[in-house]
Image (cartoon, helix red, strand yellow):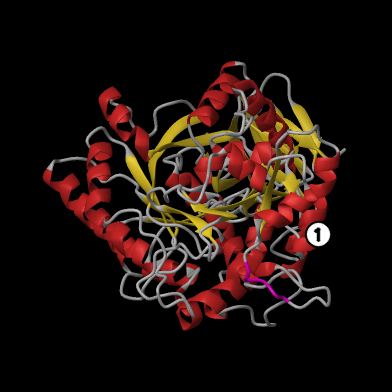
Amino acid sequence: MKLLYNANIHTLDSNHPSASAILIAGGRIIAVGDRDKLESLAHGKLEKQDMKGKTILPGLTDAHIHLQYYSLGLSKVDCETKTKDECLSRVAERARNSKPGEWVLGHGWNQNEWHSSSGRVVGGDWPTASELDAAAPNNPVYLTAKSLHAAWANTAALNLAGITTDTPNPKDGAIQRDAKGQATGILLETAMGLVGSVIPEPTIKDIEQAIQNAQSILWKMGITGVHDFDRRDSFMALQSLRASNKLKLRVNKNIPVESVEQANALGLRTGFGDEWLWIGSVKAFMDGALGPHTAAMFQPYENEPENKGILNMDGEELFEHCRKAADVGLSMTVHAIGDRANHEVLNAYEQLRKYETEKGLPHLRHRIEHVQIIHPDDAPRLAKLNIIASMQPIHATSDMFAADRFWGERSKFSYAWRTQLNHGASIAFGSDAPVESPNPFLGLHAAVTRQRADGSPSAEGWYPEQKLTLAEALSAYTLGAAYAANAENRLGKLTENYLADLIVLDQDPFLIPPNDLLQLTATATMINGEWVYTSS
């Protein structure tokens, strides 16, 4: 048994919100309270630890992460730079240290955020293959955008993929072309797969090792659980890690919509698995993203009268996938960023709720991932249909200038966490890493300030009426994430018989200025009653 005492514990249990000690055994919480009471409950060998007044919180969960992409991305070129030249310089450096013909892979560029040498934002123009050719003349280069909905490739990479002037655009994707019909090097949405498919695949062992390496980074951020949105290889690596007792994160594993037929045939259900790794929802994509202007909108993008984004399917087609999932007890979760995409998903979910009722099926916990901009008429529908809003607060501060530029006045309806809470929707927060940093304290800062680290855009924040309190935001990383994963009976708060997943902080986040959240990190992380990380 372990007894942690002399602590400032925020349990997030409304019946017993604070305590000074916590008793742990067998990976679970035996009781919370004060030291004397808990010592009287202990039996056998008792390991006592004086926490010296430090703050303890439930472990935080990232409710939307691409674990394989994030983990493998730790070894890629970091392309999230202030200028295009700096990005190209990093590519050139990696190419110089690579063998001729070896792939140079990177992630994180965002043309909308590039600055000039004077520091002024000049973003908006797409980069080209020729620029990468000059940086890496002897290597194929493939760089995914920050949004993961676009890629930038050089000529060598395009040639290896067989992309020519005659190559047609794939369904729901586009090869960007110049006035002569030549590929510029920018690939949008499904067109990314044309080059992605010729890059040597990492082995399952490679992915396992990468996830193991990433775990230790996530622990330092205070993350004890994730909802993973990567695919088969990620699932196989996670199962292997679990079998060898090397998985030290709680993982709610979502499966791609392409597998819904097989899942239906197998009778696979949401929740199948154990306390470390269990099945979540079937994940579908309704549209693209703001960065590459592919999020599906009712009205065109500002200054792009012909562009309303890319809608992958309508509500009727989505409902067919939903029906197959619901028949075997699988919940659905759908990527929807644009207001048109969210509208279609809600139409499908309305049809699905009727279907569940007519067939006597359980009303499962379906989700929308991102809900980045929603028409005001649709805003109340998530709560009405009991649909979870799975959102990423750090997207708001990252995207705010692009949203103002490309959505204009519609931006006041975007990243609207307060609106969803006021309507009564359940909210779960994540990061969409590697799109953003998985650091939940950066997300908490974004949620309570709606400002970037430099204080922009103003002292009040961007559309400040959408700000949350720290308690509300923290709940979305704990209780809300647990509810979204059907794990609210074991995760999300520190109370009797819950799993002993917790983090230790030197400072109480409720007592520090909001800007100090940006520097907050865990000094220790416990999962299943064992310390997996301590700063000492």
Report the front residue among 335 and 86. Answer: 86
Residue 461 in the image: state x and y as whole percent.
Answer: 63, 78
Overall secondary structure of the magenta section = loop
Image quarter of the C terminus: top right
The structure residue drawn at horizontal position 70% and vertical position 55%, both measured from the top left corner, is 130
Element under disc 1 = helix
Disc 1 marks which residue?
A: 86
Highlighted magenta segment, given as a residue range: 121-125
Tell me where residue 266 sits by quadrant: top left
Compared across the picture, whether 209 is left or right of 282 comes to right
Q: Foreground residue, 225 or 84?
A: 84
Identity of the residue drawn at 15% across and 41% down: 360
Crowding near pointer 1: few (<14 within 10 Å), some, many (20+)?
some
Image height of 518 relative to 285, above or below: below
Q: Is residue 276 visible?
A: no
* Furthest residue in direction right, as rendered: 536
**Residue type at tag 1:** Glu
Which residue is at the far front? 180
Measured from the top left, where is residue 321 in percent x and y?
A: 27, 43
Could you tell me residue 13's position as x and y percent? 53, 50
Residue located 51% across and 38% down the image: 230
Q: In which quadrant is the N terminus drawn?
A: top right
Magenta segment: does it hold 510? no
Residue 277 visible in image:
yes
Q: Position of residue 310 (x, y in %)?
A: 39, 60
In the displayed structure, 430 sits above or below 228; it is below
Q: Tally the numbered discs.
A: 1
Relative to 266, 14 lies left or right: right
